[in-house]
Amino acid sequence: MRIITRIQMLFFMLFSAGAAAQDMHFTQFYSSPLFLSPAFAGADVCSRVSLTYRNQWPGIQKTYRSYLFSVDHYFIGQNIGAGILFGSDVSGSGDLKTTIVNIPVAYEAKLTKRINVRLGLQPGIHMRSINYDKLLFGDQIARGGGVATIEAPVVKTTFFDAGAGLLFYSRKYWGGFSAYHLNKPTQSLRGEPDAIVPIKIGFHGGGKFLLNEEEKEEKNRRFISPALNYRHQNKFDQLDLGFYFTQNVFNVGFWYRGIPLFKSYAPGYANNDAVAIIVGIRNDRFNFGYSYDMTISKLSTISNGAHEITVSYQLCKLRKKKKVRMLTPCPKF
């Protein structure tokens, strides 16, 4: 039974997660704006520090663990935002690890009286490595059942990566486009020239709507914010679609991930991934969010879904009397 479970797990890692081709992904994509698009660099009113942790498929030993850390700032008077993003993704018993260091820079301009536009560019350095010492191969197993000790190397590769993003927003709506791996870098750990990182294309957008416009007290106002995030990379397509509800400092959201009617990863395995519940709290400076992905594909019985935690903090002193530039109406947790 355990062998069957491992075979199932291997199949879904290859087809459902696209382990060899896809970038890391996050349910609370709006809480990692620099990862979503370089056009979001400096999009907030203050300098911002953000942290994201994701533990995917905790029911399986040593699967996917992803981390993000970012800092960004808006330079008043220059209409420029810039930041730095660190990311790490560790998967499998062999510790297949991807590390990214990106430097997004965005320029902000007023398109019309009610619409702003941001153009972002992002150079970065990406590193991939695997620790063969943590893998067990058939020729290491002795006839008596023991395991032969073999010193195995840690194989690494480093490459330059380029990305870009475009964002349009008003006080109620936002939408944009992003593209990563534009230079099609080679990511092979064995020197294969055709092991190219496929270009990733993303479309994202949403809105923020006041439900009780007659309410004067800010703490009693209720907002609903629908949003979507579509990604295409190589042969893989994925869509996150949902909304979150806000009142005072509390946020609750519901999201669906998948495109079941669009395409399937393999015959009999629909692109029907997960639903997620999100809860969060926030004030003028601090934001916290927690989400749990409930897998609805055939992997649900062995994966135990995914847990994700996001934290962000604004570093500047808020000025209530001074006029503040228009900000994107994105979720803040």
Image (cartoon, rainbow, N blue to C red):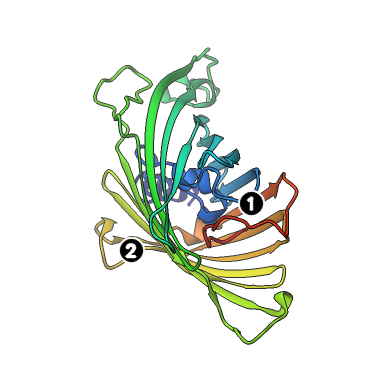
**Rendered view: 131 above or below 298:** above
Of badges 1 and 2, nearer the viewer stands 1
Q: Quadrant location of the C terminus?
A: bottom right
Find disc 2 in the rendering and name its residue.
Answer: 259
Residue under pointer 1: 310
Point 38% across, 44% down: residue: 165
Q: How far apart are marks 1 and 2 (CA)?
A: 25 Å
**Location of residue 140 in the rendering, given as x and y in whole percent from the top left corner:** 47, 20
- Can I make out residue 228 in this image? no
Query: Residue 288: horizontal and vertical position, in percent?
Result: 69, 56
Name the element at disc 2.
loop
Q: Residue at x 72, y 68 (%)?
A: 249
Q: In which quarter of the image is residue 183?
A: top left
Q: Dot 1 lies on which element?
A: strand
Three-letter code, disc 2? Ile
Quadrant in which residue 86 is drawn: top right
The residue depicted at 57 percent of the width and 53 percent of the height is: 31
Mark 1 is on which residue type? Thr
